Amino acid sequence: MRVSERDRFNTNHPDLCSSLRWKGIYVNAPRDPSVPPCNDGNFWCVHTQTCIGPDGKLAEPGNCLKHRACHGTGTCG
């Protein structure tokens, strides 16, 4: 199944894994709706400190939802 780019990079998903990080979460400013999101795909997992999660899959919002079995806990996050 092919995921749309909008869903692949959606950092506002309610089931997003709490172990996923991206540079935008460190910006302490309200989002400006007149500026389109860059969606540059710079995501990483806090457990591996890389763009690959503990299960060998890409760490990005489209993949990193709470139901993903990852780091030995049965769920990611």
Image (cartoon, helix red, strand yellow):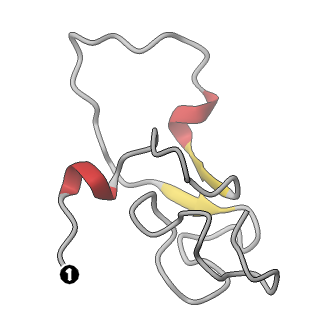
Relative image position of residue 18 (x, y in whole percent): 69, 52
Q: Residue at x 46, y 45 (%)?
A: 13
Q: Is residue 14 left or right of residue 9?
A: right
Relative image position of residue 68 (x, y in whole percent): 58, 76
As shown in the figure, which amino acid type bears the numbered disc 1? Met
Residue holding disc 1: 1
Relative image position of residue 47 (x, y in whole percent): 76, 70
Label 1 environment density (alpha carbons within 10 Å; few <14, some 14–19, many ≥20):
few
Q: Residue at x 63, y 30 (%)?
A: 26
Pick the front one: 70 or 52: 70
Q: Is residue 76 above or below residue 38?
A: below
Q: Residue at x 62, y 64 (%)?
A: 66
Q: Is residue 43 left or right of residue 36?
A: right
Question: In the picture, residue 48 is in which quadrant?
Answer: bottom right
Q: Is residue 1 above or below residue 63?
A: below
Q: Residue at x 32, y 48 (%)?
A: 40
Viewport quadrant of the C terminus: bottom right
Question: In the picture, residue 1 is in which quadrant?
Answer: bottom left
How many numbered discs? Answer: 1
